[in-house]
Image (cartoon, helix red, strand yellow):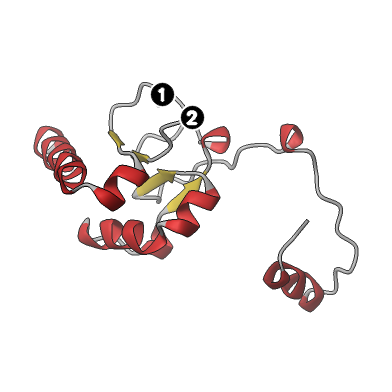
Amino acid sequence: MIDKQARQYLQEMGIDVWMPRQSSLRRPLQAKPSWPLVLVIDEAVLKQHFALFKGIVAAMQLDWADIHHCPAAHFPEDFHGWVLWADPTQNAPEHARLLVCDPQLLASDRSAKKALWQQICTQILTSS
């Protein structure tokens, strides 16, 4: 099932028949080297906490349009840039530039925000 905005977008392109694929058939996106950050987060959680994550990305001096976000199942494993893993239901992979947070805690607990900023500062200092 697709939402109203997606249906309108498809109609504008002249597509009137839409057959969703099984999620197991979807292939992960190929990583683009130009992404400064990949945000790994469930789509529903992102919708719920969009303003929070948009603020985090802006505070990292990045534009939302320049980053990539995807669920854990579609994480581009060959990506070598920064990763903000915001899906506590999935184990984060081994990655040299990995930041980990729990969206629910970030939204309600100042110490969780402080812990994320400590990760960001530590990573930036050790990588430069």
Q: Residue at x 79, y 74 (%)?
A: 13
| Mark sitting on residue 42 | none
Q: Answer with mark 2 or mark 1, whichever residue precedes in sequence.
A: 2
User: Residue 106, how many percent across, how many down?
Assistant: 28, 47
Q: Is residue 55 left or right of residue 30?
A: left
Q: Quadrant of the N terminus?
A: bottom right
User: Which residue occupies the foreground of this view, 119 or 42?
Assistant: 42
User: Which residue occupies the foreground of this view, 119 or 112?
Assistant: 112
Mark closer to the observer (2, 1): 1
Q: Are marks 2 and 1 in contact (CB under 8 Å)?
A: yes
Q: How many marks?
A: 2
User: Residue 7, how many percent across, how many down?
Assistant: 76, 69
| Mark sitting on residue 77 | 2
> Does residue 74 sit above or below 113 in this rendering?
above
Q: Residue at x 46, y 51 (%)?
A: 68
Q: Quadrant of the C terminus?
A: top left
Q: Residue at x 12, y 40 (%)?
A: 118
Element assignment for label 2: loop
Q: Residues within 10 Å of mark 1 (few under 14, many from 20)?
A: few
> Does residue 1 sit above or below 8 in this rendering?
above
Q: Is residue 122 left or right of residue 106?
A: left
Q: Amino acid at mark 2?
A: Glu
- Residue at the limit of the structure toward the top, as seen here: 94
Element assignment for label 1: loop
User: Which residue occupies the foreground of this view, 54 or 98?
Assistant: 54
> Does residue 98 sit above or below 48 in this rendering?
above
Measure the alpha-carbon separation of dots 2 and 1: 8 Å
Q: Pointer 1: what residue?
A: 93
